[in-house]
Image (tube, rainbow, N blue to C red):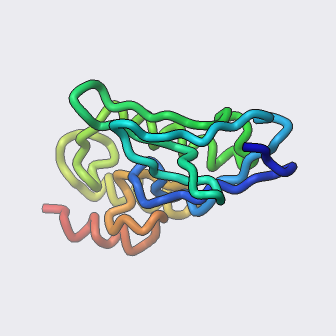
Amino acid sequence: MILDNEAEIIPGTHEILSGIPDIHLNRSRCPYPDSLTPADGIGVANWHDGGSAIITYNGTGPRTVYYGFSIDSITDPETTEMLVVNSVEWVQDRASIKGDLNNDGTITATDACIALQIAASGRWDRSADINEDGVVTALDVLMILQEVT
């Protein structure tokens, strides 16, 4: 596969791609990308020709993510960070409680305050994105507050 100066990967709906609307690559940082063929895994993001650019495996062995490109070729640093963080969290299979942002095991007003800070900053956090729409907003804060006992 030969890339133009910049190429786009079409992300699917897998949780490692949560909050990532698109992925653009810089060819100078990734001159030889690969189209992956999943044997036991599934393709979760594709090149424009339909080949898999990212594959995840969740079988009998450890969870694994394969990229058919150099991760540092992603042109947007925030997208790079989000993809890496999402991938690591998925591989580690973190089973955190949605809304428990300080990881104390309970949902409190403190968690809502943390979610409000995340929403105001424009950042994204899987545990704060209660309605799983890819962004943290005041609606997520409200949903956390509704869980406060």
Determine the residue positioned at 59% across, 59% down.
Answer: 10
Task: Out of 87 and 121, give the one closest to the viewer.
Answer: 87
**Residue located farthest toward the top when viewing the structure as drawn:** 61
Q: Quadrant of residue 98?
A: bottom left
Position of residue 90 measured from the top left corner of the image (x, y, whole percent): 36, 39
Q: Position of residue 106 (x, y in %)?
A: 18, 48
Is 103 positioned to the left or the right of 1 in the image?
left
Residue 21 seen: yes
Relative to 58, 78 lies left or right: right
Is residue 21 or residue 110 the one in the foreground? Answer: 21
State how many labels appear.
0
- Residue closest to the far left: 149
Residue 83 found in image quarter: top right
Q: Is residue 147 left or right of residue 25?
A: left
> Dividing the image into 4 quarters, which one contains the C terminus?
bottom left
Residue at horizontal 28 percent and vertical 58 percent from the top:
109
Give 51 or 106, whichever is nearer the viewer.
Answer: 51
- Near-viewer residue (92 or 33): 33
Give the image location of residue 21, x and y in percent: 58, 63
Could you tell me residue 110's position as x and y percent? Answer: 32, 53
Residue under the image location 43 percent in, 40 percent down: 38
In the rendered image, the quadrant that contains the N terminus is: top right
Residue at horizontal 55 percent and vertical 63 percent from the top: 120
Up the image or down, 1 lies above or below 128; here it is above
